[in-house]
Image (cartoon, grey):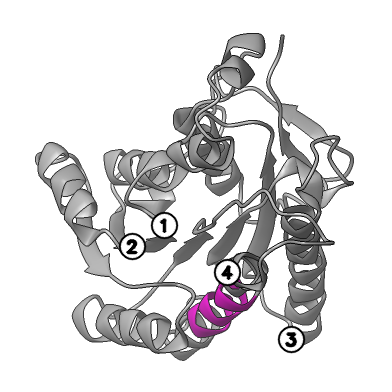
């Protein structure tokens, strides 16, 4: 699939199907709130066994209780994606308790407004630790487990951002933009490696525009005027984009530059 798809979640994804994913295993990072929680919820509703990895595992447990009776199941797992030992422990838990992984959604992220001339190193480091290093470790471990268990139709999805294409007009987001542009390079690089390996595992980068989340509210110091002036996306919109990506037939590759989730004024 080439070109850029402007995806609007209100359009039906039923032209394809999620049935082949029923009963299979997905791991979603940053699943305690916002986009991650919405993705975990929709995957469970579509019959997947989902592991929600988050520092605030209690919130994932509460979401799991709300989804009781859904076709799938949500497991809460405590872990910090900026720490390699937590990631390795999470994948070890998945292997021992669920036996495999079929879908990885790299969603965990953080946003700081910080300048290049006087920003805090800790803020820069946290963004790159999550968006680049943590994402890369999760991807590596997911691929290793897929390969070990003979899963050759798995899917790795990176929740990226519009700044992955170019710098935003918002001041003090350059470090954030840089970390997200790195995700685009990592996506394209992984696609190339998978082709060279003869693997049919797919990888997709989803790039949302402005999404109304607590993370963004904190970064903008709870300036509600930002959300008053635009029709911001909701977490459910991004979850629908994930469902669309997974529902495409196995021979369809949703490329890194194709899934741009926009909002309309």
Looking at the image, residue 73 lies above or below residue 94: above
Q: CA distance from mark 4 to mark 3?
A: 32 Å
User: Which badge, 4 or 3, is on the more N-terminal residue?
Assistant: 4
Find disc 1 in the rendering and name its residue. Answer: 30
Residue to which mark 2 is pinned: 54
Q: Which numbered tag is attached to residue 126? A: 4
Locate residue 260, reporting x and y percent: 74, 37
**Mark closer to the observer (3, 2):** 2
Q: In 3D space, how far apart are the residues under numbered discs 3 and 2 (Cα atoms)?
A: 31 Å
> Which residue lies at the image location 62% right of the left edge and 70% below the top edge?
201
**Could you tell me which secondary element the residue under label 3 belongs to?**
helix
Q: Nearer the viewer, mark 1 or mark 4?
A: 4
Q: Is residue 137 magenta?
A: yes
Q: Residue furthest front?
A: 118
**Which residues, given as a range, are shown in magenta?**
133-142
Where's the C terminus, which quadrant? top right
Mark found first going from the N terminus, 1 or 4: 1
What whole-number distance in Å separates the C-alpha atoms at marks 1 and 4? Answer: 14 Å
Identify which residue is drawn at 45% across, 72% down: 81
Image position, residue 231 (x, y; %): 62, 14
Callout 2 environment at 10 Å: few (<14), some (14 to 19), or many (20+)? Answer: many
- Assess whether mark 2 and mark 1 are in contact (beta carbons under 8 angstroms): yes
Q: Residue at x 77, y 62 (%)?
A: 118
The secondary structure type at the circle numbered 2 is strand
Residue 238 figure quarter: top right
Q: With respect to residue 17, does 189 lie above or below?
A: below
Q: Secondary structure at mark 1?
A: loop
Q: Main secondary structure of the magenta part?
A: helix
């Amino acid at each position: 699939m080439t070109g850029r798809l402007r995806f609007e979640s209100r359009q039906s994804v039923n032209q394809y199907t999620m049935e082949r994913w029923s009963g299979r295993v997905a791991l979603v990072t940053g699943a305690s709130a916002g986009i991650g929680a919405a993705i975990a919820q929709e995957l469970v509703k579509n019959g997947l066994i989902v592991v929600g990895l988050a520092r605030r595992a209690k919130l994932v447990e509460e979401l799991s209780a709300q989804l009781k009776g859904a076709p799938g199941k949500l497991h809460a797992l405590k872990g910090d994606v900026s720490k390699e030992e937590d990631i390795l422990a999470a994948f070890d838990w998945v292997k021992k308790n669920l036996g495999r992984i079929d879908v990885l959604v790299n969603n965990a992220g953080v946003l700081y407004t910080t300048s290049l001339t006087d920003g805090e190193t800790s803020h820069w480091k946290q963004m790159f630790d999550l968006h680049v290093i943590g994402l890369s470790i999760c991807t590596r471990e997911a691929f290793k487990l897929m390969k070990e268990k003979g899963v050759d139709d798995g899917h790795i999805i990176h929740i990226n951002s519009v700044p992955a294409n170019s710098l935003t007009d918002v001041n003090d987001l350059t470090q954030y933009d840089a970390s997200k542009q790195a995700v685009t390079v990592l996506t394209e690089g992984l696609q190339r490696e998978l082709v060279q390996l003869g693997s049919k595992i797919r990888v997709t980068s989803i790039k949302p525009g402005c999404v109304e989340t607590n993370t963004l509210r904190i970064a903008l110091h709870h300036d509600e005027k930002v959300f008053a002036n635009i029709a911001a996306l909701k977490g459910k919109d991004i979850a629908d984009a994930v469902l669309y990506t997974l529902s495409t037939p196995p021979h369809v590759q949703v490329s890194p530059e194709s899934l741009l989730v926009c909002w309309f004024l």
